[in-house]
Each structure stands twice: as structure tokens, then as C-alpha cells.
């Protein structure tokens, strides 16, 4: 998570910039400079495939991946912006799109979006994040729900269980049943900061999406100190106690072999874990994917969407590259290709997931999104920088991570610390 000071960034910029339009094709060979954090695994494979499509259309693809988490990628982006050399486009998402658009000139994509009819097939809340000030300056490419539940088929067999848990009580009962049946660690999550954040957001949203929206998204002090947040911390403690204690600060992928083998039972992850599992050589028949626990019986969708923001460049070849990139990102075929590699679902709601190439888990995810939107239970992920800007997110995740690692901290103490952290970061 980035702690980059917004004030520092604003001081280094020349104020607010207009958003020039990219509405006409350039009579030059398209070239695109891109920064993202995607370098390996299914994410690396997907953006490489996108680059190949760009080249097939006659473009020159210049991708500079920055391995690691959001912080490293944003540090590089900040350095290039301050040097007056921003990439033609870069990975960015959530509230950071609006914040970063205030420090460098962005491109007005309205004409291209209108020509593609893109806004009509994007969820309204998601569209709003990508058009701060009312102008499209970034384009969402894929959607994940961060609270999807992955279940090991072999662990389920060991526990003689065939019912997917729907509520947290059922989840906890299955974890205990797996433990009793010889599943060493019922939970296969990792211990990175985003993973810790996911455990908490899945717990709170599953207990009360209304409390999540009010407390985490709107930062209401009463909600942050409410009983639902305390209950969420209590649930997180259970999850942590079922995990391998030796995975602290390690990526969840180190557990996948044991997860598939049935030594670990369940995992709360985004759909990207499907892509990682398949990329590692495992099969869809090795696991089941379902919506995460929800105590009111209706799906809760913790929304995480990856996107590209387009930065103003004067070079005709880069402008032509931006036009081509925007057209590709909005293309149903490209979104299909990308999501089938990563395990996400397309941003476009008009893409048919009944065809071959989609997993039942992705179909369940798409259905869960529609049902969650209808029930007003689609909320933005805190762990993945959708609910809050990076500074606030980092302050909140600090509290959650410390709680996960230190069993001496009680849920009551964690609630107080979270509230204090939010107040300090305001």
C-alpha cells in the first residue's frame, strides 16, 4: 500500500490539467508505453497476450512491469510524472484514479467510449470511478470479487462434506469438520497485507454489507465502532487460527500445492486465484469456487476492478497507441481473452459466459455480481484500493495486519485501534 503524500505530489505538479481528447486516429505507427505491476503468473500472461494483440494491430508495445505490490508501481509512476515523462497509460484503479488525475494531464476518452457504447455495459458505480469530473480518463478491464470461496475437493472428501457453506456459521462448522478429519490447516490463505485485508473485508461484508458500506466506505465513526466490526474481528481471529502460522507475510500461492492435495481446506480469494491455480498446472476439477459467506442469504460482492489510466502525451505515435489501446480494452473479445487467462470476469455485462473457456466459478461470480447489485450488496474492496485512497487504506490495513499477527489483541481493542487509525489518517 502506498503512503505517498498527496500534498507532496500536488506541490510537484503545475496544478490541474485539462483532459485532451483522443478522438481521431493518427497516421503514424501506434506505440504504447505501459507501466503495471503484472510481470508473472496469470497476470503476466494476460498482459503479454494483450501486448501481442496490440502488435497484431500494427502497434509497438513497450510494457515496463514493476513486480511487487501497488506501492512499487506507484513509486515508479510518480517518478516518471514528476520528471515530465509519464507513460502513455498505466495500471490504476479505484479512488486513486481521481487523486492521481489531479497531478498530471490525462486524456479525455469520451469520444472513444461513446463510439464503443461502453458506458451502457459497465456497472454505474464502476463507471463513476473511471470518469472523475464527468469525463472518462481510464478504462476498467476486468472485475474480481475479493471474497470468493475456494474449496479443495480433496479436503471436502476427507471431511465427507458436499455442501458449500453459505453463512459464516456454516463456514466455521466446515472448518472444524475438516480439522477433525485430518485436514492440517482448514484455511489456505497467505499472510501478506492485502490478504489480511481480504480476511477482514470478507468477514465484515459477509456479516453486514450495510455496516461495511457505512464504516469502511463512508468512514462513519459510529459504524466503525459498531458491533458488526467487532464481530468481523472475531471472525478474522478464527480464520487466522486455522491457518499455517509459518505463512506470515507470505503470498497465498505458496499454499496451493497443499490446498489441492487436501492438506488445506478453504481459501478466501479473488477470482485471480483460479488463474494462478491453472497456470501452476492444477485443474478445475481440483477445487470448487463459490461466493463468500453472507449471513443474510444474499450474495455479497467485494468489487475489485483493474483499469488503465491514460496520460497526456504530445507524440503522435503515442497518441495513436492510446487510441488503439482504448479500443482493445473495450473490445468484448479482448475482455474475454483477458478474463479467461486471469480468472476474472469481464467488465462488460454483455459478454456471454455460457460458452466454453469459462469456469463454473466465473459463471457463479458473474451471477453473484448481478444479484449483489440488485440487493445493494456490491461494495468496494478495502484491501485492493477500491474503497479508500492509499493513505487511508494503509492506515487501516496496519491495524488489521497487527491484529492477525498478534493474538494478544482483542476484538474490542482492534475496533478502537481501527477507529483511531481512521481519525489519524483523515
Image: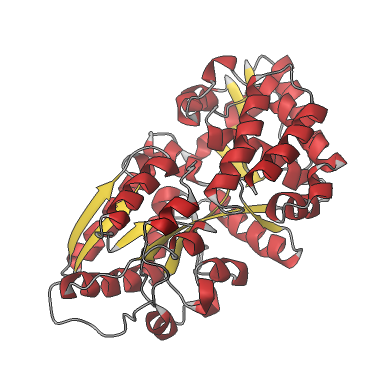
Q: Position of residue 138 (x, y in %)?
A: 43, 67
**Residue under the image location 54 percent in, 15 percent down:** 246
- Using the rendered image of the protein, determine whether residue 355 is visible from the camera's viewpoint: no
Q: Nearer the viewer, residue 310 or 377?
A: 310
Q: Nearer the viewer, residue 406 or 181?
A: 406
* Colouring mode (rainbow / by chain / secondary structure / one colour): secondary structure
Describe residue 24's horizontal placement relative to residue 109 as left or right: left
Residue, far front: 11
Q: How many marks?
A: 0
Q: Position of residue 95 (x, y in %)?
A: 54, 59
**Residue under the image location 73 percent in, 47 percent down:** 205
Residue, far right: 227
Q: Position of residue 227 (x, y in %)?
A: 87, 40
Quarter of image, res 185: top right
**Residue under the image location 32 percent in, 45 percent down:** 44
Q: Position of residue 106 (x, y in %)?
A: 37, 70
Describe residue 112's horizontal placement relative to residue 348 as left or right: left
Q: Nearer the viewer, residue 280 or 133?
A: 133
Quarter of image, res 17: bottom left
**Residue under the image location 45 percent in, 65 percent down:** 102
- Using the rendered image of the protein, determine whether residue 77 is visible from the camera's viewpoint: yes
Describe residue 281's horizontal placement relative to residue 361 as left or right: left
- Relative to 399, say whether 207 is above or below: below
Amino acid at each position: 500500500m502506498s503512503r505517498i503524500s498527496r500534498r507532496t505530489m500536488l506541490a510537484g505538479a503545475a496544478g490541474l490539467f485539462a483532459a485532451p481528447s483522443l478522438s481521431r486516429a493518427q497516421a503514424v505507427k501506434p506505440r504504447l508505453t505501459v507501466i503495471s505491476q503484472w510481470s508473472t503468473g496469470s497476470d503476466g500472461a494476460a498482459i503479454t497476450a494483450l501486448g501481442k494483440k496490440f502488435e497484431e494491430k500494427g502497434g509497438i508495445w513497450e510494457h515496463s512491469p514493476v513486480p511487487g505490490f501497488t506501492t512499487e508501481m506507484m513509486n515508479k509512476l510518480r517518478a516518471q510524472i514528476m520528471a515530465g515523462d509519464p507513460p502513455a497509460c498505466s495500471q490504476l484503479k479505484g479512488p486513486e484514479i481521481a487523486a492521481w488525475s489531479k497531478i498530471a494531464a490525462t486524456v479525455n476518452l469520451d469520444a472513444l467510449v461513446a463510439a464503443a457504447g461502453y458506458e451502457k455495459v459497465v456497472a454505474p458505480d464502476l463507471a463513476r470511478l473511471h470518469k472523475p469530473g464527468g469525463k472518462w480518463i481510464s478504462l476498467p478491464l476486468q472485475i474480481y470479487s475479493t471474497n470468493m470461496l475456494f474449496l479443495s475437493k480433496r479436503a471436502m472428501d476427507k471431511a465427507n462434506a458436499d455442501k458449500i457453506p453459505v453463512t459464516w456459521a456454516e463456514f466455521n462448522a466446515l472448518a472444524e469438520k475438516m480439522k477433525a478429519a485430518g485436514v492440517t490447516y482448514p484455511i489456505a490463505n497467505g499472510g501478506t497485507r492485502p490478504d489480511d485485508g481480504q480476511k477482514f473485508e470478507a468477514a465484515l461484508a459477509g456479516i453486514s454489507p450495510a455496516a461495511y458500506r457505512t464504516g469502511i466506505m463512508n468512514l462513519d465513526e459510529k459504524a466503525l465502532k459498531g458491533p458488526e466490526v467487532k464481530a468481523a474481528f472475531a471472525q478474522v481471529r478464527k480464520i487466522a487460527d486455522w491457518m499455517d502460522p509459518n505463512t506470515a507475510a507470505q503470498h497465498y500461492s505458496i499454499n496451493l500445492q497443499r490446498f489441492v492435495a487436501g492438506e488445506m481446506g478453504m481459501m478466501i480469494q479473488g477470482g485471480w486465484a483460479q488463474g494462478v491455480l491453472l497456470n501452476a498446472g492444477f485443474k478445475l476439477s481440483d477445487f470448487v469456487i463459490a461466493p463468500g459467506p453472507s449471513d443474510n442469504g444474499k450474495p455479497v460482492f467485494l468489487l475489485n476492478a483493474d483499469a488503465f489510466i491514460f496520460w497526456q502525451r504530445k507524440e503522435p505515435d503515442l497518441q495513436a497507441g492510446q487510441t488503439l489501446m482504448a479500443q482493445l480494452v473495450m473490445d468484448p473479445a479482448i475482455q474475454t481473452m483477458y478474463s479467461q487467462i486471469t480468472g476474472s470476469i469481464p467488465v462488460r455485462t454483455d459478454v456471454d459466459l455460457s460458452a466454453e473457456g469459462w469456469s463454473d466459478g466465473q459463471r457463479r461470480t458473474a451471477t453473484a455480481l448481478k444479484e449483489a447489485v440488485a440487493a445493494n450488496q456490491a461494495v468496494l474492496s478495502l484491501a485492493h484500493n477500491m474503497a479508500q485512497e492509499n493513505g487511508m487504506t494503509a492506515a487501516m490495513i496496519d491495524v488489521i495486519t497487527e491484529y492477525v499477527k498478534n493474538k494478544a489483541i482483542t476484538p474490542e481493542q482492534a475496533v478502537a485501534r481501527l477507529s483511531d487509525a481512521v481519525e489519524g489518517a483523515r
